[in-house]
Image (spheres, grey):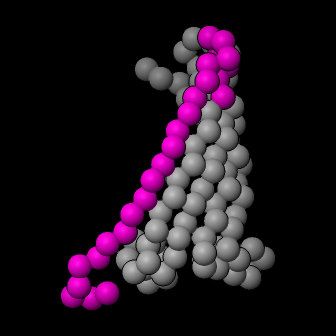
């Protein structure tokens, strides 16, 4: 709200398990409450949460690959699916990392 103090809150949990030296499994869950609609989108009052699952592979010492599945959900319809407003979305991501 314009001219007023804004407040929001959130919490997160992260876990990672090394199966062996070249494979890891990870998960994270995050929750955010934005009841004043000041942090996300344009003034939408909402609670948001997401969960992500990650498979990490290191086929070579100097190469990291990650496959991720993520689910986002809101208490409001802030996402779009075929031009309709919906309250959740699912995404898949692939990362290839070469650290130097």
Confirm whether residue 66 shows in the render.
Answer: no
**78 is higher (above) or lower (below) than 71:** below
Q: Position of residue 39 (x, y in %)?
A: 40, 71
| Residue at the (69%, 31%) spot, across then down | 55
Q: Nearer the viewer, residue 100 or 5?
A: 5
The picture places residue 31, in percent across and down from the top left corner, at 51, 58
Residue 6 picture location, percent across and down: 29, 76
Write the residue at 27% across / 88% down: 2
Horizontal placement of 20 versus 99: left or right? right
The residue located at (74%, 82%) in the rendering is 84
Q: Is residue 89 above or below residue 24?
A: below
Q: Quadrant of the C terminus?
A: top left
Can residue 88 be seen? Answer: yes
Task: Give residue 50's quadrant in the image.
Answer: bottom right
In the drawing, does residue 43 fall left or right of residue 81? left
- Where, quadrant-wise, is the N terminus in this rendering? bottom left
What residue span does the magenta drawing correspond to?
1-25
Please tell me whether residue 14 belongs to the stretch shown in magenta: yes
Quarter location, residue 57: top right
77 relative position to 31: left or right: right
Residue furthest out toward the right: 82
The answer to whether residue 4 is magenta is: yes
Query: Is the residue 42 above or below the residue 92 in the image?
Result: below
């Amino acid at each position: 709200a314009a001219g007023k103090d804004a407040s929001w809150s959130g919490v997160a949990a992260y876990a990672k398990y090394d199966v062996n030296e070249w494979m890891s499994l990870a998960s994270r869950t995050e929750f955010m409450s934005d009841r004043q609609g000041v942090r996300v989108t344009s003034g939408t009052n909402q609670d948001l949460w997401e969960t992500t699952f990650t498979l990490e592979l290191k086929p070579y010492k100097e190469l990291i690959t990650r496959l991720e599945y993520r689910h986002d959900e809101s208490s409001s319809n802030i996402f779009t699916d075929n031009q309709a407003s919906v309250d959740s979305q699912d995404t898949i991501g692939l990362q290839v990392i070469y650290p130097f």
